Amino acid sequence: MDIDHYDINSCDRDSNDIDTYAQLFWRDGFILIENFFNINLVEKYSKKIIDHFGMTPDFEHTEEFIEKSGVEVIPWFPQREGVTCFNAVSEDKKLIALTQAILGDGWYEQYSMVMFSKKGTVGQAWHQDCFPTDPGKFNMNRLMYTMDIDEHTSGGQTLVVPGSHRSGILPAQSEYFDESKAVTLSPRKGSLVLLHGHCYHKVKPVTGQYRVSTNYRVAPKDTPEDITDIGIYRNMFYQFSTAKVLKERD
Ligand SMILES: O=C(O)CCC(=O)C(=O)O
Ligand SMILES: [Fe+2]
């Protein structure tokens, strides 16, 4: 397999592929694998998600967070509510094997979260999901896409700076930040994206009817369970559990 490609279409999912994906993940901080999930499962998820949100859900984050962070996403935690059909991705054997190849023994599941954005919303500003203080402690996003995400349909493409999981903290607003190094991911329905929580990433504005991604977050052994409680933005550190701006950075 040519490991210079970000879109990996062929996926035999034998052990060689899994090792190659793990290498790619550690090189770039992310991988995109198309057609990873069974289409029937994807359809089932899609329906459940749309039934839950409808098309005009209310925002659950505070006004201050939305305004300061530039994040307009409505989260839903279906497994916490006992919606058991959302266990299917947690139990997916290929996904478990890939996670094990990347994170090694002792990794654990944090939580699953569906993220919904309405038409006309801004997506998400540049951020890291957690502090990059210790390279061994981070969240890994395992994102399932139940719709095509591209400039023609939904907008809301995901931008990632390759290798930025090794670059330390995201530059503050007043500091130099070379966005031209970012790559644009346009995951198709059924795709999996694995994304290291220390990577610099953002979501572009949503131009279509809505945008949905579903995240099964995991972490390596010894990572604190609340590692993603504080998000790193260019203008602030934000604590989700208390809904407070911990620090304005500029
Ligand atoms: O929905 C996406 O594509 C990325 C969302 C995100 O920022 C995350 O999962 O941490
Ligand atoms: Fe994120």
Image: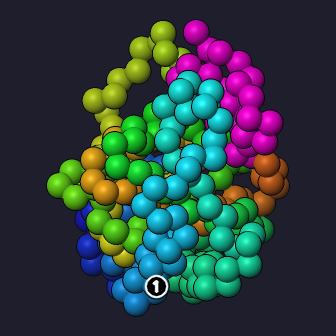
Asked if residue 110 lies left or right of residue 185, the reply is: right
User: Residue at horizontal 78%, vertical 60%?
Assistant: 221
Residue 12: x, y in percent?
35, 85
Q: In the rendered image, which quarter contains the N terminus? A: bottom left
- Residue 110: image quadrant is bottom right
State how many labels appear.
Answer: 1
Q: Secondary structure at mark 1?
A: helix
Q: Badge 1: how crowded within 10 Å, few (<14), some, or many (20+)?
A: few
Image colouring: rainbow
* Residue placed most toward the observer, 201 or 151: 151
User: Residue at horizontal 74%, vertical 78%?
Assistant: 82
* Residue placed most toward the observer, 117 or 188: 117
Residue lying farthest to the left in this orientation: 152
**Residue 145 colored in magenta in the image:** no
Asked if residue 115 lies left or right of residue 218, the reply is: left
Q: Which residues are magenta?
A: 227-250
Residue 60 visible here? yes
Residue 241: x, y in percent?
78, 42
Residue lying farthest to the bottom in this orientation: 40
**Residue 244 colored in magenta in the image:** yes
Asked if residue 61 lies left or right of residue 42, the reply is: right
Badge 1 is on which residue?
44
